[in-house]
Amino acid sequence: MIKKLLSIRFHDANVLFAGLYSASAVAEKVSAIATEEYLQIRAERADKSAFKAIMAKVAKREPLAGDEL
């Protein structure tokens, strides 16, 4: 009887873990989709000429050690 009870608890724990794992995976996917939508909206508002003007103000120099591509 103890073995059966322990077996049931082990099974329930595995089912619970599988449910939590699935919920976590779904939440991660929803978050990724929301982030993609947010970035798309921001990209649509972008002003390329303003970006180029800002980048033109950045000093032209060699990258610091460790920052090379």
Image (tube, rainbow, N blue to C red):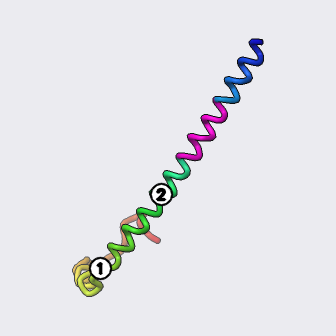
In this picture, is 18 found above or below 29? Answer: above
In the image, 33 versus 69, the foreground residue is: 33
- At label 2, the amino acid type is Val
> On the image, which quarter does residue 31 sit in?
bottom left
Residue 21: where, in percent of width, then height?
58, 43
Q: Which residue is drawn at 44% across and 69% down?
A: 68
C-alpha separation, residue under disc 1 versus residue under disc 2: 25 Å
Is 27 rendered above or below residue 65? Answer: above
Q: Give the percent coordinates (x, y) of residue 48.
A: 29, 85
Q: Which residue lies furthest to the top in this view?
A: 1
Question: At label 1, which amino acid type do we have?
Answer: Ala
Mark 2 packing: few (<14 Cα in 10 Å), some, or many (20+)?
few
Which of the 4 image quarters holds residue 35? bottom left
In the picture of the structure, the residue carrying the numbered disc 1 is 46
Magenta residues?
Answer: 13-23
Q: Does the magenta stretch include residue 69?
A: no
Horizontal relation, residue 29 to residue 35: left or right: right
Q: Which residue is drawn at 70% across and 29% down?
A: 11
Determine whether, in the image, residue 57 is placed left or right of residue 44: left
Q: In this view, does 63 lie to the left or right of 52?
A: right
Residue 42 x/y as whole percent: 32, 73
**Number of other residues with Cα within 10 Å of mark 1, as a class: few under 14, some 14 to 19, many 20 or more:** few
Element marked by disc 2: helix
Give me the disc on residue 60: none
Of 49 and 60, the residue lying toward us: 49
* CB under 8 Å between discs 1 and 2: no
- Give x and y (percent) for residue 13: 64, 29
Give the prevailing secondary structure in the magenta stretch.
Answer: helix
Name the residue: 27% across, 83% down: 47
Could you tell which of marks 1 and 2 lies nearer the N-terminus? 2
Disc 2 target residue: 30
